[in-house]
Image (tube, rainbow, N blue to C red):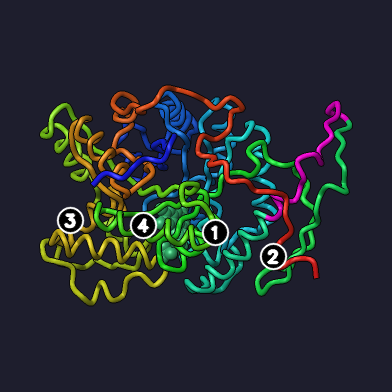
Amino acid sequence: MLVDDPPRRQLVLNLFSPNAESWRRSGVDTDRAWSIDALVQLAQDAERGLFDAIFLADSPGLGEGYTAPDPFTVLSILAGRTTHLGLAPTLLTTYDEPYTVARQIATLDQYTGGRAGWNAATGSQPSVAGNFGSVDHPDHAVRYERGEEFIEIVTALWDSWAPDAWLGGDGALPTFDRSRIRPVRHQGRHFQVDAVFNVPRSPQGRPVLFHAGSSAVGRAQGARHADAIFTAQPDVDVARAFYADFKRRVASNGRNPDHTRVLPGLFVALGGSEAEAQAQFDEFTDHIDLDRAAARLAVQIGLDLTAAELDAPVAESAWAAAGASFTSRAAVIQAEAAAKRLTARQVILRATAAFGHHIVVGTPEQVADDIELWFRTGAADGFNYRAPVRQAIRHRLHRPRPAAPAAAGHLPLRVHEHHPARPLRTADP
Ligand SMILES: Cc1cc2nc3c(=O)[nH]c(=O)nc-3n(C[C@H](O)[C@H](O)[C@H](O)COP(=O)(O)O)c2cc1C
């Protein structure tokens, strides 16, 4: 059944950061994986392909056979090499500091004329804890509790400048009206803040807030705060239920559900024919080093298939140990394995390609039909798009709307929910 599109409803497409294996298959030689050129090409491809934004995930620690650059730094560089692409780095609420994040994103937003967003993720990798002086990675509930305070502080800082607080200036002596900047005070379990923010109000009103969490507590948090929620949904029926649940939660927070976007991940192998597309997918998975991929999966979601019988289904005991930290993703990958009766080998290969996200293998028409089905039947407002090879993005995917960088350069995702300057709920003793 098709749902009526609200007026001006537009598909959102974000380019998803390439995964470890797509780097290897994209013709990028290993040396260039740490060269900004490859990422500049990717971002410029996305901009030409009319994507709304580029979104970089993060894991601030050494991975299994892969290590990622700092997303904020990368996107700050890409800001200068693109003109209207939105820029959404992940910064972790468990290991970063709210004032720093608010300031970094607000500064990026100012200097790009309103193209910045922030993916607020709690952080799913226990192994990074020691990098930040924490002995233990906090458990799921505590991470979300800290994340809640974190997001409240960041958004309060962003909202703390009245629109007329900035008086301008000649660059050498910019001026502001201090009486129009509201101090932010927060006394919580995880943070005690007494701050006066030092970045003027965003050209967008507020930078776009993305949220990545799909468990019940994650959804509840996203529904309270986010402009858009990222999620992994391999099945359209389950995605519809997720979408309806999320929009209901948004409405129950007194927010307009049409002002939030649900953005599942989408992994696409393309070809002129189905056989060609399948060949692209197979070529991609054929090159995956299974031992390394299994080791990575064990770190990512605690599913340890490093010694598993590869051509048999995954043992119950392996699933039982998974998901302590990345609860929602382990559940998605387990449900997909059960529904499709996947072997351990297939679980490893599919997770390495798409990590539980929806996989489409087909011609451009088939991919467009699939996107339309999800968009028009209430399963998605858009996607985080990832491809196995770079060329697929450049030549084959076209936005179903004209190139139209917003007049003021704002991130097209900005959903125009009014965020007035406000005090923190927990502020002002
Ligand atoms: C689409 C998506 C993207 C995410 N991106 C990141 C990321 O870049 N880095 C990270 O450490 N965690 C990431 N997470 C994990 C969340 O931060 C969170 O820790 C994890 O999802 C566990 O919460 P959940 O069970 O509510 O989903 C992501 C989660 C989702 C659903």
Q: Residues within 10 Å of mark 3 (few under 14, many from 20)?
A: some
Q: Which is nearer the eye, 343 or 243?
A: 243
Under mark 2, the amino acid is: Arg
Q: Nearer the viewer, residue 365 or 303?
A: 365
Q: Nearer the viewer, mark 2 or mark 4?
A: 4
Residue span colored magenta: 156-172
Q: Earlier in the sequence, mark 3 or mark 1?
A: 1
Q: Position of residue 378 (x, y in %)?
A: 32, 49
Mark 3, residue position? 346
Eye-nearest disc, 4 or 3: 4
Q: Amino acid at mark 3?
A: Gln
Residue 234: x and y in percent read 26, 53
Q: CA distance from mark 3 to mark 1?
A: 43 Å
Mark closest to the chain's N terminus, 4 or 3:
4
| SS for callout 4 | helix
Q: Which mark is residue 244?
A: 4
Secondary structure under tag 1 reads loop
Residue 168 magenta-highlighted: yes
Q: Which one is closest to the eye, mark 4 or mark 1?
A: 1
Q: Earlier in the sequence, mark 2 or mark 4?
A: 4
- Residue at image position (22%, 42%) is 360
* Left or right side of 391 for 217: right
Sequence-wise first label, 3 or 2: 3
Was residue 272 drawn as part of the magenta stretch in this picture?
Answer: no
Report the residue marked by disc 2: 425
Query: Residue at position x 25%, y 65% from top?
Result: 334
| Residue type marked 1 | Gly
Q: Residue at x 78, y 46 (%)?
A: 198
